[in-house]
Amino acid sequence: MIEGKLVDLVPFEDDFATYFEQWMNEESWFRARVWERREPHPEDAVKKFIEKMEKNEHGALIGFQTKDGDPIGGVIWDHEWTRVRKVDAILFVGDMRYEGTDEALDGLLMLLRYVFETRGVHRVDAAALAFDEVRIEFYHRAGFSHEGTLRQHVRWDGDYVDLELFGLLEDEWPGYEQITAQLDLQPSGIEPKPKPEKKDEKKNGSGQQPG
Amino acid sequence: MTVLHGLLVDLVPSTAEFGEKMYQFWNNESRMWATMGDYGPISRAQIERIREERAQAVERGYTGVHFMMRARDGQIIGNIGLNWVDYYNRVAYLGSWIGEPDYWSGGHGTDALLLLVEYGLSWLDLRRLALSTMGPNVRAQRNVEKVGFRLEARERQATLVNGAWVDALTYGMLREEWRGRDVLVEELDLRARAEQRYGTGDE
């Protein structure tokens, strides 16, 4: 666990894996993964995505949750380009009650903290669909600069929409402590949701093949 | 074996012969321009491994389409292609590399680019094409602007070239902005340039 002001980064497993079956099929996932084809993600596809990210040598999927342990969503760093020390950053809010809250913003800040302060990257790339104002506002608050617009780059509900590109450089990142102090993050007061029901689990002899 | 006929170049499939050319191109200064700064000595065995990996990528669902560039005099001078074709969003990213410096600034790259754009729009039914180059590559910027690409993004310090951080520039063109190969061949005087260099301006 890496502890932040309003949220902590945790391994993407247990309750996160359970919630992800729902999250990966909802609007906020497709807004975060801008060029992914709109299609259902059955249980197998969700598991495969988690496994793929676990094996990924140039990226990772990380969960973020409130101080009470309420899972909010995930952050992804990916396509790490070793030579130029660059990564893509993606934030997705699974529990939509947290959309636009300082907890969600803190998820992004914690991702930036991790890639700049632990992984030593030089530059972070981020993208947003032109109409995704909440995400764009987050990028601005986190210190990103808008660097351009790929026109009609993404298919979206019968239309093609612009993709806004953002970048943040290591010498522009003031450090997690400084930026959270500047932004004066405040908890939203959202009640933690009840724990998800566990799927059927073998009570005895886990891992054994039946007779 | 010619897939697309141009005036200064034809776009042809890759053959075994290209392995040796690739070794040559990857070890000269052209690589720095084509890769936005990533270059260094590379052995024949490494080139062979890259070629094998690329062949396997196709089996794993890689959607790129790549051509070799053959100049009017029969020389293989480089390659050009769609590095990533996204049929869902109907977008592709172009990449081009002339490995023979003697053929720079002669119109070969422009001729190849016209063929490739037309191919992407007319055969693959794409509706948008994009490409990236680096700040110092002014020649590439001029070429793609002449063909109708618009500068859409400048990603600051996105690559490292000879010890300096430089910007990556992304250009885009929508299919309705494409003025057609014939118009551009005329406007850019490619027939005359072919005649001047090879004594024939016929396709």
Image (spheres, coloured by chain):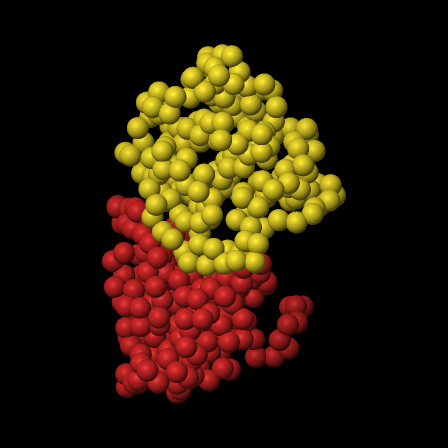
Q: Position of residue B129 (x, y in %)?
A: 38, 39
Residue in the image at 34% along x and 48% along y: B152
Q: Position of residue A194 (x, y in %)?
A: 36, 82
Residue in the image at 41% along x and 49% along y: B169
Residue in the image at 58% along x and 18% along y: B73
Judging depth in this view, the residue of A33 and B31 nearest the camera is B31
Residue A93 position (above or below residue B111): below
Q: Is residue B171 left or right of residue A130?
A: right
Residue B72 in view of the camera:
yes
Residue in the image at 57% along x and 24% along y: B70
Q: Position of residue B94 (x, y in %)?
A: 46, 39
Quadrant for residue B121, please give it: top left
Judging depth in this view, the residue of A201 and B73 nearest the camera is B73
Q: Position of residue A166 (x, y in %)?
A: 36, 60
Q: How many labels does the image show?
A: 0
Residue A31 in view of the camera:
no
Residue B78 position (above or below residue B152): above
Q: The yellow chain is which one?
A: B
Judging depth in this view, the residue of A43 and B148 nearest the camera is B148
Say which quadrant the N terminus of chain B sits in: top right
Q: Is residue A164 left or right of residue B65?
A: left
Q: Is residue B43 left or right of residue A201?
A: right
Judging depth in this view, the residue of B198 and A143 nearest the camera is B198
Q: Which chain is red?
A: A
